[in-house]
């Protein structure tokens, strides 16, 4: 796979996040041109500056994935700057806090679904519009082990959004494989990111909690999630269509 992504353009939404950074690094190491997308230009510029490009390249573009006009412009700008779009990792997402269903704020529900589900729908819609007339491509959507594979009390909005992402991915995969577009999802468990900490929890507290909750005895390394994304986007996974790859140390096995 060492040279497989040379001359390929990879778009990563939620581009300022930890898993986005690890995935951008993995693709850049394999020669790709990687474009990070998100809402905050300062955070994107910092994230891009942290990537060791090697034989690849790094760029960024601002966009709000809940706004169809901005998403269309994002894809158009990537194509304009770099000549195409071959791989997309639709990674933008939010947690939205924790509350029982009966106490869940309606605005929180709408916001979580808007970012986590509608954001992926709009991203795919405009990515597919380019890929279907330009030789196809590969799309990987960020789901979660919470929702499609397991449930947690107080996480209704997040769980519902991610379960829907998994089903949306499968449906889109069937819709577009005939056009040369492979669509899959990745479902991480607790990874070493800010989202893995409970309020007020130290790293030692979190690691002790996870050690007993996860069969592998630890949180995941973001690089392990990145490796799954890269594999799903690669020719090594050319017959993998509509799959939701769980990377959670056995937590939902």
Image (spheres, rainbow, N blue to C red):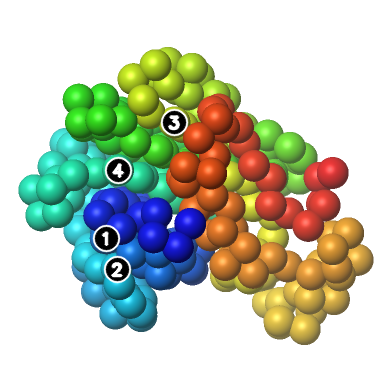
Q: Left or right of 210: which side holds 18?
A: left
Q: Circle 4 sits in a helix, a strand or a loop, which is it?
A: loop
Residue drawn 46% across the image and 32% down it: 183
Q: Earlier in the sequence, mark 4 or mark 2?
A: 2
**Identity of the residue drawn at 64% across and 69% down:** 221
**Which residue is at 26% across, 25% downward?**
132
Residue under label 1, please give it. 33
The residue carrying mark 4 is 86
Residue underneath mark 3: 182
Given contact means CB atoms under 8 Å apart, are the residues at marks 3 and 2 in contact? Answer: no
User: Where residue 223 sits in the image (x, y, percent)?
Assistant: 57, 67
Q: Earlier in the sequence, mark 3 or mark 1?
A: 1
Mark 4, Cα crowd under 10 Å, few <14 / some 14-19 / many 20+, is: many
Question: Closer to the N terminus: mark 4 or mark 1?
Answer: 1
Say how many tags the image has. 4
User: Is there a contact, CB below 8 Å, between mark 3 and mark 4?
Assistant: no
């Amino acid at each position: 796979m060492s040279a497989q992504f040379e001359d390929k353009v990879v778009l990563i939404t939620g581009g300022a996040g930890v898993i986005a950074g690890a995935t951008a690094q993995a693709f850049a190491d394999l020669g790709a041109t990687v474009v990070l997308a998100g809402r905050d230009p300062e955070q994107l510029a910092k994230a891009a500056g942290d990537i060791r490009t090697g034989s690849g390249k790094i760029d960024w573009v601002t966009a709000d994935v809940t706004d169809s006009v901005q998403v269309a412009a994002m894809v158009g700008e990537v194509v304009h700057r770099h000549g195409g779009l071959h791989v997309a990792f639709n990674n933008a997402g939010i947690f939205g806090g924790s509350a029982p269903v009966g106490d869940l704020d309606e605005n929180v529900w709408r916001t979580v679904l808007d970012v986590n589900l509608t954001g992926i729908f709009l991203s795919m819609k405009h990515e597919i519009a380019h890929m279907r007339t330009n030789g196809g491509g590969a799309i990987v959507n960020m789901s979660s082990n919470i929702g499609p594979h397991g449930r947690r009390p107080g996480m209704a909005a997040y769980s519902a959004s991610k379960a829907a992402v998994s089903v949306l991915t499968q449906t889109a995969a069937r819709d577009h494989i005939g056009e040369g577009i492979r669509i899959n999802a990745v479902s991480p468990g607790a990874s070493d990111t800010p989202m893995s900490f409970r309020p007020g929890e130290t790293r030692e507290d979190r690691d002790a909690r996870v050690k007993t909750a996860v069969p592998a005895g630890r949180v995941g390394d973001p690089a392990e999630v990145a490796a799954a994304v890269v594999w799903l986007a690669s020719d090594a996974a050319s017959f993998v269509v509509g799959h939701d790859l769980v990377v959670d140390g056995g937590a939902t096995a």
